[in-house]
Image (cartoon, grey):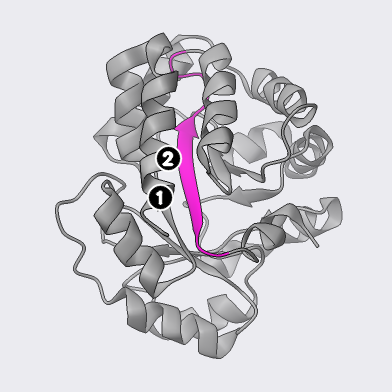
Amino acid sequence: MSRITRAFTDGKVFIPFLTCGDPDLSTTEALVLAMAEAGADIIELGIPFSDPTAEGPVIQAANLRALRGGVTTDAIFQMVRRLRKICDIPLVFMTYANVVFSRGTDQFLRQAAEAGVDGLILPDVPFEEKEEFAASCRTHGLDFISLIAPTSAGRITRIAREAEGFVYCVSSLGVTGMRSQITTDIGAMVDLVRKANPEIPCAVGFGISTPAQAAAMAALSDGAIVGSAIVRLVEQYGREAVPHVRRFVAEMKAAFS
């Protein structure tokens, strides 16, 4: 059983997101450990990209800060290797196709697997083009995690049938970012996934920023993903963000119980 699959066997799952290298990789590394200690079940690690089209202004700004700070994919791999010596939490890379292409898809995924990464999310790769990456993920033992959106409609069943790891249910149209309300019929999306593939868990992301929202989304699915609210704390507190993020993650996880 993979680390990702195991994470979904013990109740609702909380998945926080970080942009690697914002404000620096030492802080990112400390944040991963703090979030794991605070109750996170899986952690998404964003590899910065100069044109992160799925991201709202908060995470876009974090990408630019990290790139200006000189973060590299090699340094991120090295950070994951260090983390793997002391931390067993599932880690998922979230980045863009060009980041993978620029290294060579097979080489990128081989190095990711060797470092200890468990899965990959590429929000700019449509379902119809995923096999170029998914096949190499399978070769190296990573889950290629598919996204479904409110606009996926008739494609949800096809996506769910081929899903690996978990299905990332996008709660809102547009880019990532905090929202005061989530109006998408998440329950209907999750029901379609479960009918097509009862074995695959669903986690909901995009727009979740409060414990109440996270609990509401987790009640309809198998877990919640939070990015912008955490990245904003990192922006606000910089290298002093660790205790603030730890407290936030603990509050989010507590809302599930």
- Number of disc labels: 2
Residue at the location (77% across, 58% down)? 2
Q: Residue 257 location in percent, x, y?
A: 42, 59
Q: Residue 34 location in percent, x, y?
A: 53, 28
Q: Tell me: residue 194, above or below residue 133.
A: below
Q: CA distance from mark 1 to mark 2?
A: 6 Å
Q: Residues within 10 Å of mark 1 (few under 14, many from 20)?
A: some
Asked which secondary structure carries label 1, the reply is helix
Q: Residues within 10 Å of mark 2 (few under 14, many from 20)?
A: some
Among all residues in the image, which is located at the extreme bottom?
195
Inspect the image, locate mark 1, and give the three-letter code of the amino acid beneath it: Ala
Inspect the image, locate mark 2, and give the three-letter code of the amino acid beneath it: Ala
Are the residues tagged 1 and 2 within 8 Å (C-beta)? yes
Q: Which residues are magenta?
A: 11-23
Can residue 185 be spotted in the picture?
A: yes
Left or right placement of residue 123 versus residue 199 in this view = left
Which residue is tagged 2? 250
Q: Residue 251 location in percent, x, y?
A: 36, 42
**Quarter containing the N terminus:** bottom right
Which residue is tagged 1? 254
Residue at the location (50% across, 63% down)? 12
Q: Tell me the quarter of the picture where residue 255 sits.
A: bottom left
Residue at the location (56% across, 88% down)? 196
Q: Residue 29 location in percent, x, y?
A: 59, 21
Asked which secondary structure carries label 2, the reply is helix
> Per the image, is 15 magenta?
yes
Residue at the location (28% across, 32% down)? 58
Q: Tell me: residue 137, above or below residue 193.
A: above
Left or right placement of residue 221 versus residue 5 in this view = left
Left or right placement of residue 54 versus residue 162 in this view = left
Q: Tell me: residue 195, above or below residue 257.
A: below
> Per the image, is 81 magenta?
no
